[in-house]
Image: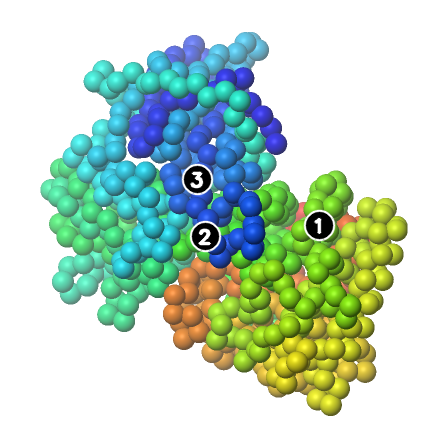
Amino acid sequence: MEKNCVSEEYKFIGGYGNSLNRKVFTIDSKPQKAVLQITADAHTYAKKSWMQPPGGSSDAGNWLLGGSFLKYRIFVNGSAVGAGPFRAIKTGNMVCHKFDVTEFLQTGENVLGVFSRGEKYGFSCQLTMTMIDGSEQTVISDRSWKYFNVNDIYSPVCWFRQSISQDFKGGAGPGEWSEHIDGTRFPDNWNNVGFDDSSWADNLEQTCSGVEVEAAGMDNYQLQRVAPKTISSLPDGRIVVDFGREVFAGLEVTGPEAGGDVEIRLSENLQSDGTVQFVMRTFNCYQEVWKFRRGGQKLAHFGLRMFRYVEIVDYSGEFTADKITAVTCNTPFIDSDSSLSSSEKDLEKIWQLCKNSIQYTNIDSYVDCLSRERIAYEADSYINMLTALCVERNLPLAKRTILYQLEHPTWPCEWKLFMIPLVYEYLMQSGDLQLAEELYGRLIDNFSCHQLRDKLALVPDFPQRIIVDWPESQRDGYQFGEYCTVPNAFVYYNFQLLAKLAHYLGKDADCRQWKVLSAEHAAAFNRELFDPARHLYKDCRNSEHCSLHASMFAAAFGLVPEHEKEFIGEFLVGKGMACSVYGAQFLLEALFKLNRSKDAVELILSNSDHSWLNMLAQGATVTCEAWSVKDKANMSAAHPWGSAAGNQIVRGILGLRPTKPGWEDYVFEPQPGQIKQISAVVPTVRGYFHVSARQNGGQIEKTLEILDSPVK
């Protein structure tokens, strides 16, 4: 954490609520370098009892409720140069961002503008300009800035907190409020040179000392403009815009020449009659009225929504593509860093769907969805990270997610058991032994469950509700009870990973201890939870039911004895994808570990109801929260935890994964099943792996090169 990155005492302006803030300054020449540092109010969270373990005392919530997700948008001479801040890793802290604004400045008069949505203080900033002669000029946030209150223009104001349970129509989402914009009172061109701000008030300055401030820790949000793909008209004159893909964005709309009230409706999906389902399946309600003045005024959202479609109601005159833009807000993604080609074109489509799922949803941490929750759940983060690090080399985002997740735990039993796998997989990808060392003791104390084992060498009861799979309809009839099989499989896997972490950290005694514990746990697991008559794992010790999940997790985590693998493999194949998009991660891992690559590939390439091709057939551009609405009526259409196929194409079909921290060593053991040819570029901390596998006369021919570039 970096403290006081602007000044020893933070001078905040903008205050609480919606405000426009501008500072006019003059420079004699264009600077060699100009960096804006900005800090804003901490985000406010609400917590619900179902997110906390019994007796939990943490005051760190996860569900963003107060204030706003974005707290500022920055403009220099009318150009949008950034937005923020990230949510702090530690609740209550502020986050400092740095923006390079050199290219936006000009000789002579300049305007720095900040649209602020403060919760208490507003924002504090300092623009440092290094001139060609080495001298510096600065602009700081103080009472010399001009201020204009726009609470009544962008209404309702942000301190009207929505209920977590939401009302019958839903809310705009966590950290968002409906923005009914009165453009007739909005000061157009407020952030440009030449605007008359003589009627604006001088800013009120507040001092906030002793505040904890974190550096952002990774690249800032990027604002990118996305044009509509199609525009169509309904019989009653309403206009439907399709951006062709999911976007996490705000809208910019140019109003009609005649002005007037225009209703804006957004959604991830259309209804059967072609209208936009603006009260979405996720319960978000994206419905707002914007009042335009005459002359083709342009208005824009401050906040962010997750959508693909827009419905425009009561727009007079011609509506063309240049009158609407989605301005996305994501952390940077380099599309050219990874690629895949295959003789199976459907595999390429599935891989691209999973890659898009990462690119279109990346924000300040991995999240489950950007509509209903924007929460980092441990299970979502695990699958998200595995796929993300197969398609992009964004290790700072993975690290930031882990640190954030530790401070903002969530509710299901197994979700917290993902913290050790998250740290382990990050270490293997990054080689960051320092972080592993820092977190090692905390992982043991809070996530290993070693202290919960009893005389049977298993865990009889867990402190939080066991989930097995989600939604509930995807559990294959799982029966709950004492000594539950699925979380006990996680405990074994975590013992295994802790032994490896201890080894890499030079903790030899610990390594031996974890190996002993894992051996004891495996023996007890197979003695107490396995039914030898059926050659299957029971759901719990006293259950007669053997679900897909009991044997699936046992196989995925390496608990199946060699002589039982054939039986378990046959059972899993016979069940098929009788699990959710979350469970699919572990079913595929299990099949590849059991050398059932043909069956795993068939599941990946399936077009059944439970498949990625079926998601594509439903129009998905990001993996969904569930296979379809039949499985989860309130599912989000942009949920990157559905991207298991993306990482299993690399880690399973291509068989490429690290075996020592930082890719110091790795395995490359393709299991292409029925795929005749596949090649990929996989970005890693060691370089770009150019890999291919081809089947020739029953043999697999494979090639691997590690290059400094994704292009040969």
- Tell me if residue 670 can be seen: no
Decide if residue 296 is on the left or right side of residue 391. left
Please provide percent x and percent y for residue 169: 27, 58
| Separation of marks 1 and 2 at Cα, in angstroms | 24 Å
Say which of 19 and 664 sits in front: 19
The N terminus is located in which quarter? top right
- Tell me if residue 477 can be seen: yes
Q: Residue at horizontal 59%, vertical 36%?
A: 217
Look at the picture and state if 97 lies above or below 30.
Answer: below
Please provide percent x and percent y for residue 360: 47, 52
Decide if residue 261 is on the left or right side of residue 618. left
Say which of 602 and 149 sits in front: 149
Q: Which residue is mark 2?
A: 48
The amino acid at mark 3 is: Thr
> Marks 2 and 1: in contact by CB < 8 Å?
no
Judge the density around disc 1: few (<14), some (14-19), many (≥20) Cα neighbours within 10 Å: few
Extreme residue in the left direction: 258
Please provide percent x and percent y for residue 547: 61, 80
Please provide percent x and percent y for residue 145: 34, 17
Look at the picture and state if 96 lies above or below 199.
Answer: below
The amino acid at mark 1 is: Asp
Give the numbered dot on residue 44. Answer: 3
Mark found first going from the N terminus, 1 or 2: 2
Q: Secondary structure at mark 3?
A: strand
| Separation of marks 3 and 1 at Cα, in angstroms | 28 Å
Q: Which residue is mark 1?
A: 445
| Separation of marks 2 and 3 at Cα, in angstroms | 14 Å
Give the numbered dot on residue 246. Answer: none
Q: Residue at horizontal 78%, vertical 78%?
A: 527
